[in-house]
Amino acid sequence: MKSLFPPIMKKTAFAGLLMLGVFLAGSIHGGPAAAEPQSIIAFGDSRIHGDVASAKNAAVSRGLLSAVQTAAAQLISNRDLTENFGTVAEMLSSRQDAFVQDYRILKEFRGEKHYQVLVQATVSKQKIQQAFSRAGIRTESDQMPAVLLMVAEKNIDDLGFDYWWRQGYADFSQPASVSPIKQVFTREDFTLVQPDSSGGSPGDLFSGIDPGARPSDHEASLLANRLNADIVIVGTAVAEATSNRMGENIRTFKADVKLRVIDAGTGKPLTTVQKRALTVGENPDKEGKAALADAAYQAGKHLVDRVAPLWRNTEQADDQFMIRVQGDSVLLYLEDLRSALREQSGVSGIQTSEMTGNSATLAVDFNGTARELANNLLVQSFDRFGINIREISENGMSVQLTRD
């Protein structure tokens, strides 16, 4: 492999070489990890102006630049490449030698007017990523997580909450509070997961759970996992009339949107937000929807810049398991279950991360597998209740408390 570079040709046909390089790299090498060095085969071409050696050097330089452009194109979205094309083109052409680790000429051909080469170059994608980062250009390592929205909405005259995960959700119309949140997140390149994207039936999606308008963190994260989402935003949007009036018909309406963000992989809450909006008018339904949309938009704007960093920084120890406990009057028996867990060999710590009247989530530090912990619990004798382990995953389990 050669390690010395020919003179850099700063003026190139960027677009044509880039398309050719992408085609070759895609067909030969597939999709390597973003930060790994990549071996890329690319064409180089230069017109002969009397000096054959100079033409050859120019052809090699253009081939290497094409390889660098190919690697760069795999690290950046089409949208960001288009928006930052001038910066990217200048950066790659002026710093080509910083990105190429080594290269060799596979074939060369001298025509009547052109010198053509086929080069194989090892390109440092990590250095390209670093250069993009310094220039404020996002790469695929900054790819936004897939988001599932679970917002239950109640307008002024609604008797109860409307939400897509209730029975018959396929016929549920778009709520006023969801569209603004979708708009904000889509604009920042997040993928919004559709409720029917699992490819299965609603029965498969809700197997083992029956979430209401206010699902628990476990239920929300379980649905998100089944729909291949990375994050779930769950909460309520409620519109109400206030006591403020002007004359007989004009009233003030308020909407409160309360959302929490949960990591689908771990079930951990990442952040929360609560926003309120007010409208004034005569039509309760119309003004309620307007207030809901306004409050939801504010909540989305608050969350959109926080979600991705929080998601990337979420870490869970390899030996920590989330145990979701459900059943009537869970709180009466929770300490008995915690005591039984403490007695298990390999358990070094227990924390209660969520608790309601009929459900609780325990974070258990256990030196073993979820299956081993489940087996240990099954042979445990409880005086006041029994347990039914309904689901076991790599990072935890779902437990139903039962009574005779």
Image: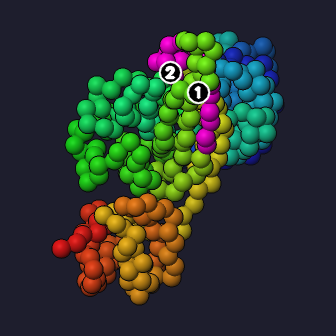
Residue 140 visible, this angle: no
Residue furthest left as drawn: 404
Q: Amino acid at mark 2?
A: Lys
Whether residue 227 is situated above or below residue 387 in the rendered picture: above
Q: Is residue 287 magenta?
A: yes
Q: Mark 1: which secondary structure?
A: strand
Q: Amino acid at mark 1?
A: Ser
What's the residue at 44%, 43% (across, down)?
229
Q: Read off the residue under disc 2.
A: 289
Across and down, in percent, residue 287 comes to 53, 18
In the depicted view, which residue is nearer to us: 345 or 132? 345
Residue 51's tag is none
In-image side of 374 versus 21 (left or right): left
Q: Read off the residue under disc 1.
A: 243
For label 1, the crowd category at 10 Å Cα-Cα, with few meaning under 14, some 14 to 19 and many 20 or more, is few
User: Which residues make up the magenta segment?
Assistant: 273-289
